[in-house]
Image (cartoon, rainbow, N blue to C red):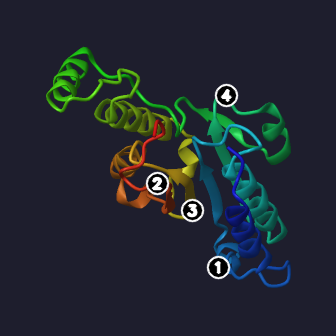
Amino acid sequence: MPPSNNTFNLQRQLVSLSTPSRCYVVEKCCRSRMEVIFVDNGLIGKGEHSYSLIKLVGERLTLCGVRYRAFGMKSIDPMIVTEIGALPHFSRSLYESERLTPNQQSLLRLFALARGRAFDASIPSECTSARVLNAAYEQDLAALPPDIWSPDKLIVAPAVSQNQIVGLVRALRAKADGERPRIVCHLMFAPSWTPWG
């Protein structure tokens, strides 16, 4: 999905506030040897907002002397790996979902019949999606290089939904107090939003 003009323009404005001589956002980072780590299971191709955000912010961080790394989907476009150095990592995408279980299908079919509506078996299961995808996200975070889990790192999760937030919290709670980095998390969608409409 291509980034909206509003998203792209906002990203460009935020990045353009800094110049190599005055890096407002990263001034403190430069002094503390901070490294920024982007974790984005929505980073697949050049058409996503994730790509433009990491590219623009990464360029600014580099100009300001701050190291960064990016971790995207295992199926990431190889051109992105070459261009911005993003590493293939995540097994499940931000936009994936899980099918209804047979029990869920039976129950929803009964509800649809009682309401006089047609049952749509193509609608995925929100409960199963949340459980399975949060667990996969937690496992993927736990499998990141151990050196990123320290207080002098800043983890940026530019795309998190209800199917990742619990996995993120669990991954952080599993770390000792002295190992937890700072986190910037952008909640992608309202809780009622689903990728299937």
Helix, strand or loop at disc 3? strand
Disc 3 versus disc 4: nearer the observer: 4
Report the disc number at residue 75: 4
Q: Nearer the viewer, mark 4 or mark 1?
A: 4
Q: Callout 3, which amino acid?
A: Leu
Q: Quadrant of the N terminus?
A: top right
Q: Mark 2 is on which residue type?
A: Phe
Question: Mark 1 = which residue?
Answer: 28
* Residue 154 tag number: 3
| In front of the other: 97 or 24 | 97
User: Going 49% across and 35% down the picture, which residue do you hit?
Assistant: 140
Left or right: residue 190 versus residue 88 is: left
Q: Amino acid at mark 4?
A: Ser
Mark 1 or mark 2, which has the lower sequence index? 1
Report the number of discs.
Answer: 4
Crowd tier of the residue under label 3, counting other residues whose Cα lies within 10 Å: few below 14, some 14–19, many 20 or above: many
Q: Secondary structure at mark 2?
A: loop
The answer to whether the residues at label 3 and label 1 have Cβ atoms under 8 Å apart is: no
Quarter that holds the C terminus: top left
- Residue ID for mark 2: 189
Left or right: 165 with respect to 103? right
- On the image, which quarter does residue 163 sit in? top left
- Decide: marks 4, 1 in contact (CB < 8 A)? no
> Hey, which residue is sitting farthest top in the picture?
102
Q: Residues within 10 Å of mark 2 (few under 14, many from 20)?
A: few
User: Real-space Cα distance between discs 3 and 4?
Assistant: 25 Å
Report how far apart the C-alphas of labels 3 and 2 lie in the structure: 22 Å
Dot 4 or dot 1: first in sequence order is 1
Image-quadrant location for residue 90: top right
Q: Earlier in the sequence, mark 3 or mark 1?
A: 1
**With respect to residue 55, does 78 lie above or below?**
above
